[in-house]
Amino acid sequence: MAVVGQVSKVSRYLTPRCISDRCSSSLSAAHMMNENSRFGILGGGLAGLTSAYYLSKRLPESSQIIVWEKAHRFGGWVQSSRVDDQTNGGSFVFESGPRSVRPKGLAGLISLELIRDLKLLDSVIVIPKTHPSAKNRYIYTKHGLQKLPSSVFSLITSIYKRPISLIPRALLTDLLHTTGKSRTRCIDDESIHEFIARRFGGGIGEELVSGMVHGIYAGDYKKLSVKSSLFKSVWEMEREYGGVLKGLRSSDKRQHSTDSNDEEKLRKTLDGKPLHDLINSSVWGLKGGLETLIVALREWLGRKPNVILKSAESIQSVDISPDSPSKVITSCGVYEHIDHLISALPPQILHSCLGPSLQDRLQFLTANPSVTVGVVNLAYRSARRINPIPPAFGYLIPASIGADLNPHRVLGVVFDSDMMPGVEERVGGEEVTKLTVMLGGHYYSTQLEPIPTTDQLITQACQTIKNQLGIAQDPFYAQAQIQKDCIPQYLVGHHQRMRELHRLLKSLNLSLVGSGYSGVGLNDVVKSAKDSVENLVNNGCSSGLEIFDT
């Protein structure tokens, strides 16, 4: 969409100090760059492919990089499918995984740099902050759909704008009694629910916050860590300023003072008006869906003589030793003399591949569960708008909505045609309205009944659309996916556990990347891969968890 001129390349963005005791005795940076080192990457999702991408850019061609993926396709949860409309011609795109990306912070800029370097800027769909889907996000209540704040900060700000008679006592405490001792030092972490209830009262959490958590984590806000969530910045405001309101008043100054040099350097290189508009947009997507990024990564890696991509080959076991190369046993063979392993597998899957001694040592890999989400894509054909709601991103359903109004445990509904217009890439046939219904998540983890089948999910999704949106028309096309264990749940204490895991990995030639550790979003995954590779090449070692070494 945007044509951007050639931009100078930044050689490095993050170089966190590596405090590992083995850095001085392990493979040196010079050795990693110049010798015939062999690297293995476990998992060919987004984290695995971007790890291979950054490694290949930094290492000599004499090195070897092997990527193993158990599925026949690469990309993991990034799944886009094009459906041909046999009746009226044309086609449309469904997303079974992420569908939009926020260009926010250093992680957002790194993702933008990646798509620029892969020459995907002409495929970018920019959704500006003035777009209806950026301004209109809803939450489903007992009284129907109500507009939802678009961010954590706008959520907190909206609370303070309530009439004084409606402000809960806990919020008044925050408003009127801001002190430097509002949170005891012994509270190193707590659940999102505990923090919100303590500062603003329980009702706000049940009605608003739990819905936002459903949309991002498909999780239970009473169990998830506030320190490792999107509410971290607000939680830290309380610690730094003694109250959230005071922190909000100081947020502009705080943001300016904490901007990293790396972010500023990268932001300056991403110049030019078209890319400037992208950086300052609400979200962005790609024509043909976000799997366009996966295809571009595969094609780029396929042209590199030192990269070997192996699909339909699952990891059976991994033998890692601090003093000798590692060995990987897959469903197709044995690979020895691996100088360094990067695991992009889900933490619990990696743990199951380790030997007994390492399983005991790295038990924190199993600390967090993951939730399963049912994703149902619906397509309606109509000459006019069938959605009674004005153009919007969609709506979320909070925990306060019981089984009487939400019997199928729907987490939220995305108005795909509104939030990412242009993803189809070509025009043909009649107008198609697309909706995506997300079901289950943490609800599936606690229910006694089995997870519904794909046919049952489609029926449940259609019933939900009829009951909640009043769309009586049946979709002319529907598909469902059961995304098993797709979103890790960072339980309270996650940061401390990852810090300890970082310490335990010091003596091992193993790095951890992906959504199981430092963020579940696309930007988080790309950044974790880049950080790990930068540390590995520059310092000769990396746990992938250096961000927790604070």
Image (spheres, helix red, strand yellow):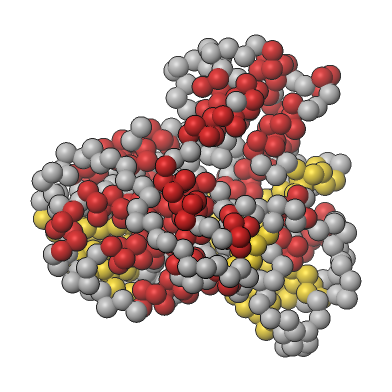
Residue 197, picture quadrant: top right
State which quarter of the image contains the C terminus. top left
Residue 249, picture quadrant: top right
Residue 325 is situated, as x and y percent measured from the top left of the image, at 14, 59
Figure disc tally: 0
Is 448 located above or below residue 88 in the figure? Answer: above
Residue 165 is situated, as x and y percent measured from the top left of the image, at 84, 19
Is 407 located above or below residue 57 in the figure? Answer: above
Q: Residue at left 63%, top 70%?
A: 1
Residue 358 is situated, as x and y percent measured from the top left of the image, at 23, 47
Residue 437 seen in the figure: no
Residue 49 seen in the figure: yes
| Left or right for 293, reference 411 | left
Is 114 located above or below residue 381 in the figure? Answer: above
Name the one closer to the observer, 228 or 411: 228
Q: Residue at left 66%, top 17%?
A: 174
Name the one closer to the observer, 386 or 486: 386
Residue 267 is situated, as x and y percent measured from the top left of the image, at 50, 51
| Left or right for 22, reference 280 | left
Name the one closer to the observer, 526 or 369: 526
Q: Residue at left 88%, top 76%?
A: 383
| Left or right for 439, reference 39 | right
| Left or right for 502, reference 162 | left
Q: Residue at left 17%, top 44%?
A: 23
Residue 368, picture quadrant: top left
